[in-house]
Amino acid sequence: MMETKKVYFPNLNGVRFIAALMVVIQHTEEAKIKIGFPTSFSEESELGQIGVTLFFVLSGFLITYLLQSEKLSSGTISLRNFYTRRILRIWPLYFLIILLGFWIIPEFIPVLWDKTSSTNLSAHFTAQLLLDIFFMPNAAIILFPPILYVSQIWSIGVEEQFYLLWPLLMKYFSNPLKPLVILIVFFVMARTAALVTFTALLRDTSTSTNVLDQLVFLRRILGLTRIDCMAVGGVGAWVLYNQKQRLLGALYSKSAQITTFLLLIVLMVNRIHFNSERHLLFSVLFTIIILNLSSNPHSILTLNNKLFSYLGKISYGIYMFHAIAISLAVKLLVKYFTPETNIYSYNTLLWAANSFLYFLVICIVTALSMVSYTYFESYFLAKKIDFSTIISGDSMNTETYTDNKKGMAHIAPLLSK
C-alpha cells in the first residue's frame, strides 16, 4: 500500500472565509440597492468578483501542490481517485442548490420567491437546467436571466472545468510549469483576439448582429472562465513545492508583503473595473499573499485561529447559501426598518438598519452552512480519505494546529526534498 502523507497549510481556511465574505458583502450591498436602501457601494463595484478570483487562485494553488505531492509519493496521479475526491466534495452541495433553486423553493417556500424569479425560471427552464447539470453554469448565466439562489454556481462550474483538465496535464507533463504557462498565455491571447475582432467588426457596418452577439458571448465566457487565475495559483504552488529559494526569499520579505497588500488595497479602494486582463494582476497579488500565509513563518498577516479555521471549513456552504440568507435578512429589514420610523434620527436608524441586516445575514448563512456541513457534506467528505494518498483540508483535523510555525513544521517534510 502507498504511504499516506499529510499536507496542511496554515491560514488557508481563513483565506477561504475571506473570499466567501467578499462575495457576501457584494451581494448584500446589491440587495440594498434593489430595495432602494442607502449604500456607499457603486453598482460597478467588483468586490464579489475579486473574492471569486481569490477562490480560483487558492484552488489552483492547492490542487497543483497536492497533485505534485501525490505524483512524487506514488509515482503517478490516479485520475480515478482525483475525480472521485472532487465529486465527493463538490457535487452533493452543487446539486442540492440546483434542486432548491429549480424546484423546492419555487414550489414549497413562496416567501423566498417572487414573480420575476418565476418568469426567469420558466423562460428557459430546460436549457438552463441542462447547462447547470452538465457543469456549464458559466454559459447559462450569460445566455439566460439568472435564476434566484442558483446563479452563484457559475464559479463552481469553472472550477469543475479546470479540475477536468488539470490532472490530465499534471499526469503526463513531467514539469507542470510548462502547461501552467501555456494555459495563462492561451487565455490572455484568446481574450485579446476576441476583443480585437469584436472592435474591428463593430466598426464594419456590414457585420451582422448575430456575429456581434456571438463575439460578445465569447468575450464574456472567456472573462468568466478564469482558468488562467487558477494557473497563476498553480505557478505559486510550483514555486513552493520546488523550493525556489531565491524567489521565495524575495516574496517572503516584509517589503514584498507590505507592497503586495498596499497594491491590493489601492486597486480595490479605487474600484478599478474588473475586466480584460486586470484580473491577472489580482491573481499574482493573491498568489504572493497565499504563499506567505501558507508557508512563511514570518508572515505579517495571520488568519490561523479556531474561528477562521472553522468558518473556512464551512465556506463552501457560506458561498452556496448566502443568497438565501440575504433574501431572508432583507425581508426582515424591510419589515422592521422603514423611512417612517421616527424614534431615532435618520443616521442612527441607518446605522442600526445596516447592523441589523449584516447581523442577520451572517447569522443565517452561518447557521445554514453549519447544518449543511455537519449533517450533509461531512457524510461525503468522510469518504474522501479512501481515495487519498495525500491527506489534506477537510480530511484532516486542523484544530490541532494553533499557530503558523507549528503548521509549517507539519509541511516541512514535503518542502525539503
Image: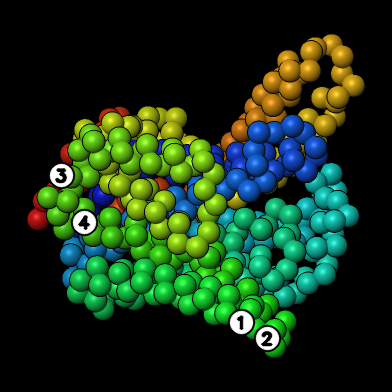
Label 3 – label 1 distance at C-alpha:
48 Å
Residue 74, percent across and down? 20, 67
Q: Which residue is farthest left?
A: 417
> Which mark is in front, 4 or 3?
3
- The residue located at (39%, 54%) in the rendering is 281
Residue linked to disc 1: 201
Residue 93, percent across and down? 58, 55
Dots 3 and 1: beta carbons under 8 Å? no
Amino acid residing under circle 3: Gly
Residue 250, percent across and down? 18, 45
Element type where label 2 sits in the image? loop
Q: Quadrant of residue 135?
A: bottom right
* Frontmost residue, 361 versus 223: 223
* Frontmost residue, 76 versus 33: 33
> Which mark is in front, 3 or 2?
2
Residue linked to disc 2: 207
Amino acid residing under circle 2: Thr
Label 2 – label 4 distance at C-alpha:
46 Å
Sooner in the amino-acid sequence: mark 2 or mark 4: 2
Label 3 – label 2 distance at C-alpha:
53 Å
Dots 1 and 2: beta carbons under 8 Å? yes
Q: What is the count of numbered marks?
A: 4
Element type where label 4 sits in the image? helix
Please identify the quadrant where the C terminus is shown. Answer: bottom left
Label 4 – label 3 distance at C-alpha:
11 Å
Label 1 – label 2 distance at C-alpha:
6 Å
Sooner in the amino-acid sequence: mark 1 or mark 2: 1
- The residue located at (68%, 57%) in the rendering is 150
Left or right: where does residue 185 sit relative to residue 142? left
